[in-house]
């Protein structure tokens, strides 16, 4: 009888522990939660990857091995993927690159048409030449979406939603929440050393990078206060400083 009571008591303790543990596991933490930083993923242009899936084997195998038939056989796929690129809308993230994008997209479309035309003939040397031109046109289009300094692009991925969403919506809480991420990205950017290929723009890059760092510090200072108008002004100045730093590479 005594043993039975002990079993019941131990069973009660086990069940109680299980129930309490389950409740605690499902209860949200009561510690204050910091707002989530608005950081976006880099947008992609519809069709670029798909086009690459066709151009890669053509360039690295068919062209290299002078497999003329394989090049001719790829023409329908090139037309199909080019149609995806032609119908794609440029993501707003790249709005400042629109003119360059349209120019490079047109050049790639022409290269595909040239390939199709030469594929119908018998001049294999001409076929190789237009294949080379197509590959070059594709690479130039891809470069529109690739910053020369990835750390600057990383900074932009935090800045973009602040400038295009938080600021227009006067979401000062989101702006304030993003300042640690901006400082972190800026600290990494300050450690970047340009390659020898970019040494001519190095002095300008250093100057504009220093200005961007100062503008980040000014925004942080404004976010520590209560003047929302000041926050708007400093975010505007920081955005301008970013544009000026990015523009340095346009003269490269």
Image (spheres, rainbow, N blue to C red):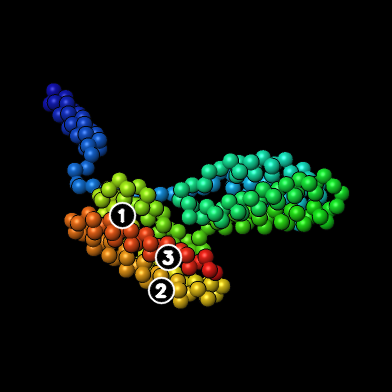
Q: Secondary structure at mark 1?
A: helix
Place residue 156 in its image quadrant.
Answer: bottom left
Q: Residue pushed farthest top?
A: 1
Residue 143 seen in this snapshot: yes
Nearer to us of marks 1 and 2 is: 2
Nearer to us of marks 3 and 2 is: 3
Which x, y percent locates residue 223? 24, 58
Structural crowding at the residue carrying mark 2, measured as other residues with C-alpha within 10 Å and reported as few (<14), some (14–19) or many (≥20): few
Question: Does 135 sit left or right of 158 as displayed?
Answer: right
Residue at 23 percent of width and 39 percent of height: 28
Label 3, label 2: how far apart the Cα atoms are: 10 Å
Q: Which residue is mark 3?
A: 244
Q: Residue pushed farthest right?
A: 122
Residue 207 is labelled as 2
Residue at 67 percent of width and 57 percent of height: 136
Q: Which residue is mark 1?
A: 178
Which x, y percent locates residue 251? 53, 68
Of the two numbered discs 3 and 1 on the same chain, state the one appearing first in sequence: 1
Residue 42 seen in this snapshot: no
Question: Does 174 sit left or right of 64 as displayed?
Answer: left
Label 1, label 2: how far apart the Cα atoms are: 24 Å
Of the two numbered discs 1 and 2 on the same chain, state the one appearing first in sequence: 1
Structural crowding at the residue carrying mark 1, measured as other residues with C-alpha within 10 Å and reported as few (<14), some (14–19) or many (≥20): many
Q: Secondary structure at mark 2?
A: helix
């Amino acid at each position: 009888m005594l043993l039975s009571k002990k079993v019941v008591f131990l069973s009660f303790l086990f069940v109680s522990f299980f129930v309490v543990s389950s409740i605690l596991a499902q209860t949200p933490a009561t510690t204050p939660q910091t707002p989530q930083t608005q950081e976006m993923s880099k947008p992609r242009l519809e069709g670029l990857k798909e086009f690459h899936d066709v151009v890669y084997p053509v360039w690295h195998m068919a062209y290299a091995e002078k497999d003329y038939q394989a090049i001719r056989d790829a023409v329908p796929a090139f037309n199909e993927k080019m149609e995806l690129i032609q119908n794609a809308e440029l993501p707003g993230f790249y709005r400042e690159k629109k003119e360059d994008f349209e120019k490079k997209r047109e050049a790639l479309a022409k290269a595909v048409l040239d390939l199709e035309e030469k594929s119908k003939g018998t001049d294999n040397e001409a076929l190789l030449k237009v294949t080379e031109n197509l590959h070059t046109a594709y690479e130039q289009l891809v470069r529109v979406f690739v910053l020369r300094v990835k750390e600057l692009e990383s900074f932009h991925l935090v800045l973009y939603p602040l400038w295009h969403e938080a600021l227009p919506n006067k979401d000062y809480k989101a702006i304030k929440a993003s300042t640690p991420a901006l400082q972190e990205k800026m600290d990494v950017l300050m450690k970047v050393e340009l390659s020898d290929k970019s040494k001519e723009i190095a002095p300008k890059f250093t100057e504009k990078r220093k200005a961007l760092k100062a503008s980040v510090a000014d925004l942080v200072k404004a976010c520590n206060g209560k003047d929302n108008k000041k926050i708007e002004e400093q975010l505007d100045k920081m955005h301008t400083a970013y544009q000026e730093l990015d523009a340095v590479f346009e003269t490269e």
